[in-house]
Amino acid sequence: MGYQQILMLVLAVIIIGLSVTVGLTMFTQHMMSINRQSIISDMNIFAGVANAYYKTPASMGGGDRTWDVDRMGMWFGYNYDAANNSISNSNGTYVFSSSDDVLTIVGIGTSIGNDGSENVKATLTLTGQDFGIVTIINN
């Protein structure tokens, strides 16, 4: 083989290696983005159900303008874990907590987040009286 042929072979191997690396990086970033969007979507659905619970009178099984996380878990229609105040699905795990008139939902995804070590995470806070929603992406 001549030097030109060896040079072309080495160059082809380098280009293919770089292409595979870039492709894997793009795939990983896309999966992280999809998982983050999925947990935020799930948290918005949970916020809507929680708002219905909050506004329903106690005589009808609702919260009567209070956040009772354990009782509210039955409203979600998922496998609610009362010991951890959480719900899990294929997108991640969602932990519920309340303080005064604010319900907090923390969603922890299944994909590794931006920091490269912990999973995707977002926090949704829901205020009962005015139904104000704030979502923060933590990772």
Image (tube, rainbow, N blue to C red):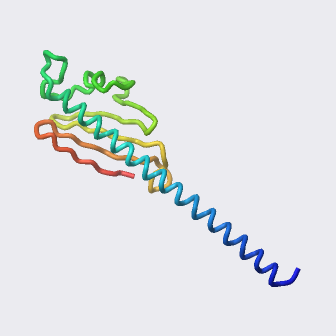
Q: Is residue 55 left or right of residue 136?
A: left
Q: Which residue is drawn at 25% across and 36% down?
A: 47
Q: Which residue is drawn at 63% across and 62% down?
A: 20
Residue sitting at the far right: 1
Q: Could you tell me how many numbered marks the image carries?
A: 0
Q: In this view, does 81 lie to the left or right of 70?
A: right
Name which quarter of the figure residue 46 lies in. Answer: top left
Name which quarter of the figure residue 48 lies in. Answer: top left
The one of 50 and 95 positioned closer to us in this rendering: 50
The one of 108 and 131 positioned closer to us in this rendering: 131
Give the quadrant of the N terminus.
Answer: bottom right
The one of 1 and 126 positioned closer to us in this rendering: 1
The one of 112 and 43 positioned closer to us in this rendering: 43
Residue sitting at the far top: 59
The answer to whether 31 is drawn above or below residue 14 in the figure is: above
Q: Percent position (x, y) of residue 16? A: 68, 67
Q: Percent position (x, y) of residue 139? A: 39, 52
Q: Which residue is drawn at 13% across and 15% down?
A: 59
Q: Is residue 8 left or right of residue 15?
A: right
Q: Percent position (x, y) of residue 53? A: 20, 27
Q: In this view, does 126 lie to the left or right of 17?
A: left
Q: Percent position (x, y) of residue 35? A: 43, 46
Q: Which residue is drawn at 76% across and 75% down?
A: 10
